[in-house]
Amino acid sequence: MSSYDEFIHLIDLNDYPVSWWKQLLELGHDIKENPENYSEACKGKIMGTLFYEPSTRTQMSFQTAMLRLGGTIIGFDNPATSSVAKGENIKDTTKIVSGYADILVMRHPSAGSVKAAALTAECPVINAGDGGHLHPTQTLTDLLTLREEKGTLENLTVGLCGDLKNGRTVHSLIKAMSCFKGTRFVLISTKELALPVYVKDILSAGGHEYKEVSSLDEAMPELDVLYMTRIQQERFSSREEYERQKGCYILDRQKMLKAKADLVVLHPLPRVDEIAIEVDDDRRAMYFKQAKYGMYIRMALILTILNKNGTPARLVCGRALPSVRCSNPRCITNHEEYLPKYFIGGGDTVICEYCDERTLI
């Protein structure tokens, strides 16, 4: 076992069995019901937060979680105020900060960046979002919300609407919900913002029913869960491309009239204009409550990782192919050239271990 495999890192929720997720959800529920029992659970522990991208809910949720557990926090929320602005690479930053902290939480704009950090970190690392790739702690937040509000994670028809191409929360949630019996997916987007092939491959391989539609109105009556997402300006290569897509999908009172009485509306936030303010008063709108559930599940995650409750997942399962360049221009290996290039598979096509992108060799 490599040194980086000694820790319980959370890079991708699907690196761990569903039984481990359920353990986290149970603990999150107990923390929600009995917060006083956990007020000093992390006394003397330090969490390092490395946020290379702006964040409100995720960053504050993690900070509040650690403070409510009795721990303390170091780190940055703006790389311009750190040595990153001087050109320091991920390896050097995380190597130093992980020597100060007991656990690291990292957000970065490049896909696979958090896995890259975990390869050399000296403490456990949690993925708080790596570009448009994955956002596992948002997924845990979504799962806890559904567990508490729907009472089950099985046999649900889940609609996902908006930017399905770049939405890391969407990719993570689909991968997670595909592990529960009877889940059916309705993918609502424009053709330009359709779900990436690698995520569809997961659904096809698991035999999960899904359909792609362009109309939110038509999809509303069949949904048990509606997961709205914003069109993310920061993921587009040009302002013009963003302008063509924004405003395509807006959830309003008229659309809610077509929905089931027990629909749950989720949104990872922030929203721009994709959910009308009038929907906030609908009892089916759960997105603000969802953000609070995020604090509880992150408390559970911090405790679980620091207490080493679980079997560490292997960070690297494939092989090194030094001469192969990942086809994803947003992959961290195309920005930090020193990183070893790991791929899974054989033949003419391999899959990048950092960003899950298919690459021809």
Image (spheres, rainbow, N blue to C red):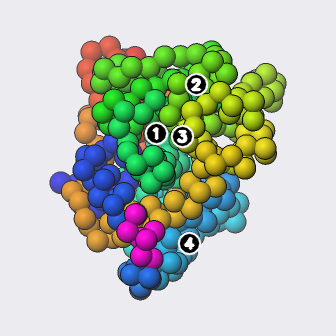
Is residue 135 positioned above or below 228 on the image?
A: below
Q: Quadrant of the N terminus?
A: bottom left
Q: Alpha carbon of mark 3 to alpha carbon of mark 2: how far?
A: 11 Å
- The picture places residue 110, in percent across and down from the top left corner, at 55, 42
Q: Nearer the viewer, mark 1 or mark 3?
A: 3
Quadrant of residue 124 within the rendered picture = bottom left
Q: Quadrant of residue 271?
A: top right
Q: Is residue 303 left or right of residue 246?
A: left
* Residue numbers of the magenta segment: 29-35
Between the C-alphas of marks 2 and 1, the distance is 21 Å
- Asked whether the residues under the numbered discs 3 and 4 touch, taking CB atoms below 8 Å apart as contact, a structural biologist would say no
Q: Nearer the viewer, mark 3 or mark 4?
A: 3
Q: Is residue 30 magenta?
A: yes
Q: Is residue 120 within the magenta segment?
A: no
The residue beneath circle 3 is: 262
Residue at which label 1 appears = 173
Residue type at tag 1:
Leu
Q: Residues within 10 Å of mark 2 (few under 14, many from 20)?
A: some
Note whether residue 136 is visible.
no
Q: Earlier in the sequence, mark 4 or mark 1?
A: 4
What's the amino acid at mark 2?
Pro
According to the image, label 4 marks what residue? 64
Residue at 56% from the left image edge and 70% from the top image edge? 63
Which of pointers 3 and 4 lies earlier in the amino acid sequence? 4
